[in-house]
Amino acid sequence: MSAPAPAPAPAPAGRVAVRLVFADRGAFHETTVRLPADVLARYDRIIDALREDAAITAEIYLDKRRLVAAFLEVD
């Protein structure tokens, strides 16, 4: 069992922390990104914003084939 992920740093104003979980050959990897809150608010699902919104796709590279979960970090 791996060590728990470190607590994310506070998100800058206007951004929210989103935890992304990727699968790679049976292993799972997590990372936290900070995305614009106003962009995420326009979508019902985080995954749709990650796939479709130019403000997000221009900012981060996302391996959509390996992405298995995306959820808001709770403070």
Image (cartoon, rainbow, N blue to C red):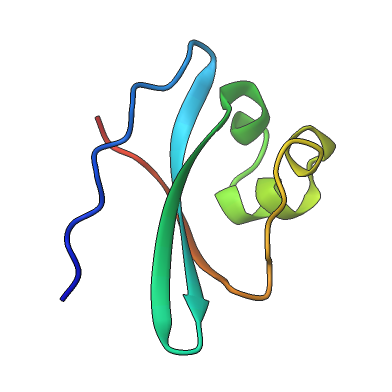
66 left or right of 74 in image: right
The quadrant the C terminus occupies is: top left
- Number of disc labels: 0
Q: In this view, does 37 lie above or below 47?
A: above
Question: Residue at 68% of width from left, 56% of height from top?
Answer: 62
Examine the image and state in which quarter residue 66 appears.
bottom right
Question: Residue at 84% of width from left, 38% of height from top?
Answer: 54
Q: In this view, does 28 lie above or below 38?
A: below
Q: Which of 31 and 15 is in front in this view?
A: 31
| Name of the residue lying farthest toward the bottom | 25
Question: Residue at 24% of width from left, 38% of height from top?
Answer: 7
Q: Is residue 45 visible?
A: no
Question: Residue at 61% of width from left, 55% of height from top?
Answer: 47
Percent position of residue 38, x then y: 63, 22
| Name of the residue lying farthest toward the top | 13
Percent position of residue 72, x then y: 40, 42
Percent position of residue 27, x then y: 40, 81
Q: Is residue 36 visible?
A: yes
Examine the image and state in which quarter residue 9 appears.
top left
Percent position of residue 21, x then y: 45, 63
The quadrant the N terminus occupies is: bottom left
Q: Nearer the viewer, residue 28 or 73?
A: 28
